[in-house]
Amino acid sequence: MKSPVIKVHIVDDEPDSCNGLKSLLEFYPDIKVLNVSNSPREGLRAVLSSPPDILFLDIQMPQMDGIEFLKRIEPLLKQLSVVVVSAHKDYAIAALQESAFDYILKPVGNEDIERVLMKYHRIPEMNSNPKMTENHQYLSKFLIRTNDGMEIINLPDIIYVEADKNYSYFYLSSGQRKVSCYNIGKLEKQLYDACFKRISRKHIINLARLDSIDGRKKVCIMKAGSKVIALKYSVSLFEVVDLMANNFPLYKIQ
């Protein structure tokens, strides 16, 4: 199913920053950059007349800084997500206190955009379960970068992730295999959900899919329906068991 288009505005007094951010965003087919403003006053008029889904907003600007900008669009903050873009972390944190959705420290990279998009796609899920905003372990969506763009998959559907040089493969309970442009080291950081564990140089497993551990053969036995998969582990057996005892299951497998 095709993802709905995400409407984006950019407000930053630095043209180079605007152009760089716009170029990054145009990589994603489900994003449409509707307005780019180097003047905060012009940007404010654009937002008020046609609110975007996501607003990328600089903090340090002449005429009107980002904090004042946020105050002026306060009535709209429930229907749009503001991502503050700043070279200074202190300014970004101050913006978060003014109800900004997220912040990015300059220079902006692809990983920053993907993190924001992943968080944005989780908004409906978080709104339906307030506890999710208190504990990220309840989140159940994951955004992967592919050669063709981006794809959202359900965390409970992942059985394991396998490294293949600079690429990685997601093996799903449906039998599908999804390729990611990211190496397993980067995915290990992104799969912050406590129900995922890297068990070797080559594999990350979903602990909710772990059926048993064979200590003699040093393999984790994964199950998906009638399918049984044995994966070698190189971490401490007690480390894996402890994770299972403390975190399993974080979500229900359908």
Image (cartoon, rainbow, N blue to C red):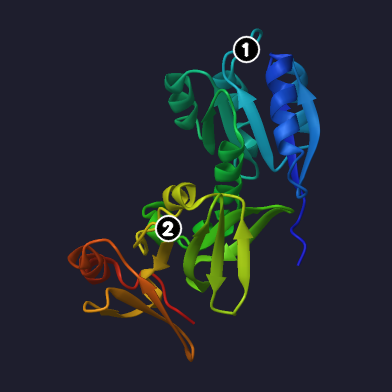
Q: Residues within 10 Å of mark 1 (few under 14, many from 20)?
A: some
Measured Cα–Cα span from mark 1 to mark 2: 34 Å
User: Is residue 174 at least partly visible in the picture?
Assistant: yes
Is residue 107 placed above or below 63 in the rendered structure?
below
Look at label 2 and name its amino acid. Answer: Met
The residue sitting at 41% across, 62% down in the picture is 204
Tag 1: amino acid = Met
x, y (%) of residue 56? 65, 31
Q: Quadrant of residue 54?
A: top right
Earlier-in-chain disc, 1 versus 2: 1
Q: Position of residue 171 (x, y in %)?
A: 54, 71
Residue 202, given in percent of the width and then of the height, sits at 43, 60
Residue 72 shows in the view: no
The reply, left or right, for residue 1 in relation to residue 201 is right
Q: Residues within 10 Å of mark 2 (few under 14, many from 20)?
A: some
Residue bearing mark 1: 61
Task: State the SS at label 1.
Answer: loop
Looking at the image, residue 137 sits to the left or right of residue 160; the answer is left
Quickly name the residue at label 2: 132
User: Which residue is more in the foreground, 80 or 200?
Assistant: 200
Residue extending furthest toward the bottom: 226
